[in-house]
Image (cartoon, helix red, strand yellow):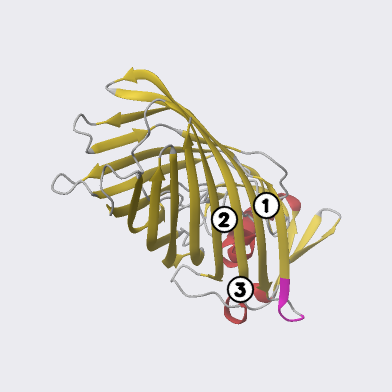
Amino acid sequence: MWLEGKGGMLTVKVVQVFGQGKTFNLKRREIMGKTVRLLKCCLPIMIISSLLFFPVLGFGGGGGQYPNGSEQFFTGAVPPPGFYVKDYVYFYTANELKDNSGNTMKVERDGVELKDLDVWANTLRLIYVSPIKFLDGFLGTHLFIPLVNVDESVTVGTPGGPLKISDEKTAIANLIYNPVFWSYHSPNGLFHAVTGVDIYIPVGPYDGQDLVNIRKNFWTFEIPLGVTWFLPFNPNIEVGAKFMYDFNTKDNEYYVAGVKTDRLPGQEFHFDYGINYAFTKKDSPVQVRAGVGGYAYFQTTDDEVDGNKVKDNKGRVFSAGPGLLATYKKWVFDLHGSWEFEARNRPEGFTGVFSVIYGF
């Protein structure tokens, strides 16, 4: 698809990406409504250009601000009052883009094909847990500062044949700030929980017509609930999950067929999960746990572009894989990875995370 402009008219040429080629002559004041009606056809192209956050998997609908799979162990167990630093090294790779039926999109059939997507991120998380108690829990605050590299290439259909498009960027991604979270620890030490509101703050450069954008050009207000439960019949077994629900604001610099419009990303429900077992004794100076975990992601409401709902484009994905955790004095080391499956309207690939925590 491309645009040609003459006077007060725009010619929208819809090429092989949409199947059969068609040409529409539109007045500028009509372009928004009619291009939105083309949205379902050309969305695979546009959603690729709407990347990304932290691993920012911006294909498909929704906001995609949260890096799925970041947590697996002790998802609800916040440490005691003090200052902590956690550093995440996050990696995501994929070479398949799934459609609404779960089929891998091919340029010959769909007009677009994901060739390669690699995302590296190093995120510094600053955590402060105060001694202030509220409803038997402690209050705290945290801030995430992510540095992200995205390298992506796709193939699109054109009148002259398939065209490969590539882009790579490195930048600070959207900050995540929670002004006040609340953490709870049961008296018997078997159940732990934490909740608050994580705010995703847009920072850095943005161009809605680029293939890759590190910045997500909208705010997200995310309500997380992390829970950790050590099973009473065997406290060596820990089961946990971090449940999240996201509300996104409008992106006023979204492009449809080269025309600037707006997009309201749909709401999202997603969670990281894990179950693990402690293989060392409680009095051992080094504690080691191993288990399995992953994540699930569901877009719950449709995107809206120029006030029109985009149907059959809700994102969905599941993942599962192994994990290993070790602690030594004030240090915590976490290594886990998971493979995605049953993806809809988004890539399907592999996520790997290595994190280190130090308590002062």
As shown in the figure, which amino acid type bears the numbered disc 3? Glu
Mark with earlier residue (3, 2)? 2
**Which residue is pictured at 43% across the width and 71% down the height?**
101
As shown in the figure, which amino acid type bears the numbered disc 1? Asn
As shown in the figure, which amino acid type bears the numbered disc 2? Gly
Mark with earlier residue (2, 1)? 2
Q: From what the image shows, is residue 347 above or below residue 127? A: below
Disc 3 is placed on an element classified as strand
**Which residue is pictured at 49% across the width and 48% down the height?**
355
Measuring from the top left, give residue 186's x and y in whole percent: 23, 31
Write down the region rendered in magenta: 160-164
Measuring from the top left, give residue 36's x and y in whole percent: 60, 56
Mark with earlier residue (3, 1)? 3
Name the residue that disc number 1 marks.
213
> Where the N terminus falls, by quadrant?
bottom right
Mark 3 to mark 2 CA distance (whole Å): 15 Å
Name the residue that disc number 2 marks.
58
Q: Is residue 61 left or right of residue 162?
A: left
Picture quadrant where residue 296 is located: bottom left
Q: Main secondary structure of the magenta part?
A: loop
Residues at discs 2 and 1 in contact (Cβ within 8 Å): yes
> How many C-alpha atoms fall within 10 Å of the one at disc 3: few (<14), some, or many (≥20)?
many
Tell me, for residue 113, which label it has, or none.
3
The total number of labels drawn is: 3
Q: From what the image shows, is residue 227 above or below residue 4? A: above
